[in-house]
Amino acid sequence: MNSVWVVYGGAGVLAFIAIALITYAIKSIGWRFVSNVFDKKLEQFKFQQLQEMELIKHNFTKSMDRRMKINQIEYEVLPEAWRLLSQAYSGSVRTILGSTSIFMLNHLTWAQSEKALLADGFTSDELDDIKRSEDMDATYRKYVSIKDYNVSVEPRVQYSRYIRQNGIFISPELKSQFHVISELIENAMHDALHNIHTDRRDRQWEAIAKFRSEGREKMDELEAILHARLWSDVALTDA
């Protein structure tokens, strides 16, 4: 009887040990499987994160390169735009505000007047027109105004052409200030030309009055802004 219990007891122990070993093996295999799956998922996640970081880095670098290129072009465009605007402004002042040339032709002999006018570049037809006029001083001033206007056209055209081609590289804030001054000049020149053609050179239209009161101030403001913008970056680079 005792031997039967020993046999059955030993078999039970062996069965328990076998079950435990099988359970351990299953758990071990399952854990390895789960661990392998997790590791693969983790590697995939890390790879995706690395790709996204590389893409962000690439886009950031590309954006910075583009911004640096635009800034570089802007710093080349701004001085030339300012130079042309200054020439357009200076060339228009004489027409808008009136010529400073004064000849008292009515009080000179024609020989004296003719000599002075020839030296000033008047043509023979213009001389004949002045000579035949009842008021030689008024006719002379009209021709001077026309000449001043014609001289002012080319700088304005050059500025307009340059801004049309390169204005895209100027920041909107600065470009709007360039536009304000350019519009101030063009409106005043339009009225000045009307005064020349109607022989009313002293009439103060609104645009001319605005040019007189705001023109120089707007130019000085823009000059100060451009100076600070250009030289602040030079200082940062040198530092």
Image: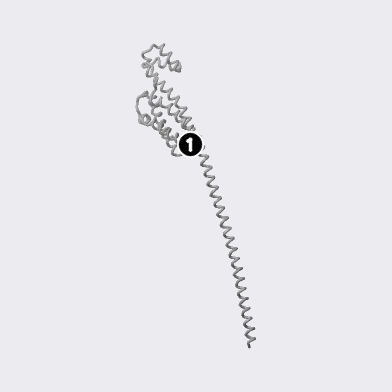
Residue matched to label 1: 235
Q: Position of residue 89 (x, y in %)?
A: 43, 29
Quarter holding residue 220: top left
Foreground of the two, 35 or 126: 35
Camera sees residue 155: yes
In this rendering, would 12 be left or right of 138? right
Q: Position of residue 183 (x, y in %)?
A: 41, 33
Q: Please name the residue shown 46% across and 39% down the image.
A: 171
How many marks overall? Answer: 1
Q: Residue furthest bottom?
A: 1
Above or below: residue 3 compared with residue 222: below
Tell me how the rendering is colored. Answer: one colour
Look at the picture and state if 200 lies above or below 73. above
Q: Quadrant of residue 34?
A: bottom right
Tag 1: residue type? Ala
> Does residue 14 appear left or right of residue 120 in this picture?
right
Residue 113: percent from the left, percent from the top?
41, 13
Percent from the top left, x then y, of residue 68? Answer: 52, 40
Q: Which residue is drawn at the image coordinates 60% and 71% (left, top)?
A: 24
What crowding class fits label 1: few (fewer than 14 Cα within 10 Å), some (14-19), or many (20 or more)?
few
Q: Give SS at disc 1.
A: helix
Residue sitting nearer the eye, 214 or 162: 214
